[in-house]
Image (spheres, grey):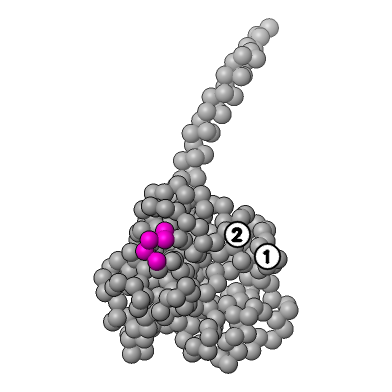
């Protein structure tokens, strides 16, 4: 009778250990490849968005599209690039020009945000809501809350416009309104990947315009292996790598802590974003 030789317990443990080691090597590599892939797709979104932003200005006498998500202080609201979700005060502030929405109560939080995207002036140039969403943005896939805001369950739009570009007048910012007013256009960014814990990316993306403060206001979204995408006034887009571990830690923790306006003294990341921000009351 032929006897089959079975694995000994030690041999089985060795095989299991080898498999575990291989998984430990392969899984991080797969995760890194996935983040790189989402970064490439996000970069494509940024290029489409900034092309639409530039085209709008060309077709409207050099005037920038509104970079806010609501009507601020009586300023004209008919030119917003997107409108805040249906059911929020951002949407109601724009009641004079947004279309009526039948049976608002039947809409999911994500559908409410998509209606606001379609109501914005850039949607005519893009026609696809998916361009407004980074594939690495997973906020809508898990529940979180901030200040009781249930819209936090279904975030969709991943990008915001820098407040100095016809956007929000937060912190004394006096925005530009025409693209021809901007100097050093290859360095001044338009669209930023943003993670707002209040439920959707509200208003514009802003930073303190006090050069010595090193104070962040709105948090960055870092979904691409310590990198984020940005697009610029001259029409190009790029993936930028962050250097300061404090920047990355803040982005990773913001949905849990809800902490805005942090200070990172001598941060090279803050300096990079400060130099790329522009408004009337900053050095061009």
- How crowded is the residue under tag 2: few (<14 C-alpha within 10 Å), some, or many (20+)? some
Q: Position of residue 117 (x, y in %)?
A: 54, 77
Which residue lies at the image location 42% right of the left edge and 53% below the top edge? 265
Q: Quadrant of the C terminus?
A: bottom left
Confirm whether residue 123 shows in the render. Answer: no
Which residue lies at the image location 65% right of the left edge and 14% below the top edge? 9
Whether residues under marks 1 and 2 lie with C-beta atoms below 8 angstroms apart, the answer is yes
Seen as rendered, the residue at the extreme left is 184
**Where 63 falls versus 197 (above or below)?**
below
Decide which of tag 1 and tag 2 comes sooner along the chain.
1
71 left or right, relative to 67: right
- Magenta residues, start to end: 210-214
Which residue lies at the image location 59% right of the left edge and 24% below the top edge? 16
* Residue located beneath label 1 in the image: 147
Dominant secondary structure (helix, strand or loop) of the stretch shown in magenta: loop
Seen as rendered, the residue at the extreme top is 1
**Where 96 falls versus 240 (above or below)?**
below
Which residue lies at the image location 40% right of the left edge and 75% below the top edge? 164
264 left or right, relative to 87: left
Residue 211 falls inside the magenta stretch:
yes
């Amino acid at each position: 009778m032929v006897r089959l030789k079975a694995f000994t317990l030690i041999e089985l443990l060795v095989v299991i250990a080898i498999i575990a080691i291989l998984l430990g090597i392969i899984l991080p590599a797969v995760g890194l490849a996935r983040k790189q892939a989402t970064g490439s797709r996000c970069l494509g979104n940024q290029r489409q968005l900034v092309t639409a932003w530039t085209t709008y200005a060309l077709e409207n006498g050099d005037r920038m599209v509104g970079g806010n998500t609501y009507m601020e202080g009586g300023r004209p609201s008919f030119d917003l690039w997107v409108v805040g979700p249906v059911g929020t005060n951002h949407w109601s502030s724009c009641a004079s020009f947004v279309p009526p929405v039948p049976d608002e109560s039947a809409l999911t939080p994500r559908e409410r945000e998509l209606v606001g995207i379609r109501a914005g002036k850039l949607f005519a140039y893009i026609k696809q809501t998916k361009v407004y969403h980074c594939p690495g943005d997973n906020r809508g896939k898990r529940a979180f809350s901030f200040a009781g805001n249930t819209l936090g369950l279904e975030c969709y739009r991943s990008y915001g416009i820098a407040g100095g570009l016809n956007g929000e007048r937060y912190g004394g910012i006096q925005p530009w309104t025409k693209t021809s007013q901007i100097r050093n256009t290859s360095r001044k960014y338009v669209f930023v990947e943003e993670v707002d814990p209040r439920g959707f990316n509200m208003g514009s993306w802003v930073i303190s315009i006090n050069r010595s403060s090193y104070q962040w206001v709105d948090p960055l979204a870092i979904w691409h292996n310590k990198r984020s995408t940005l697009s610029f006034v001259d029409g190009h887009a790029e993936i930028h790598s962050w250097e300061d571990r404090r920047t990355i830690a803040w982005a990773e923790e913001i949905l849990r802590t809800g902490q805005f306006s942090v200070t990172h003294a001598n941060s090279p990341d803050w300096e990079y974003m400060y130099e790329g921000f522009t408004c009337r009351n900053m050095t061009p």
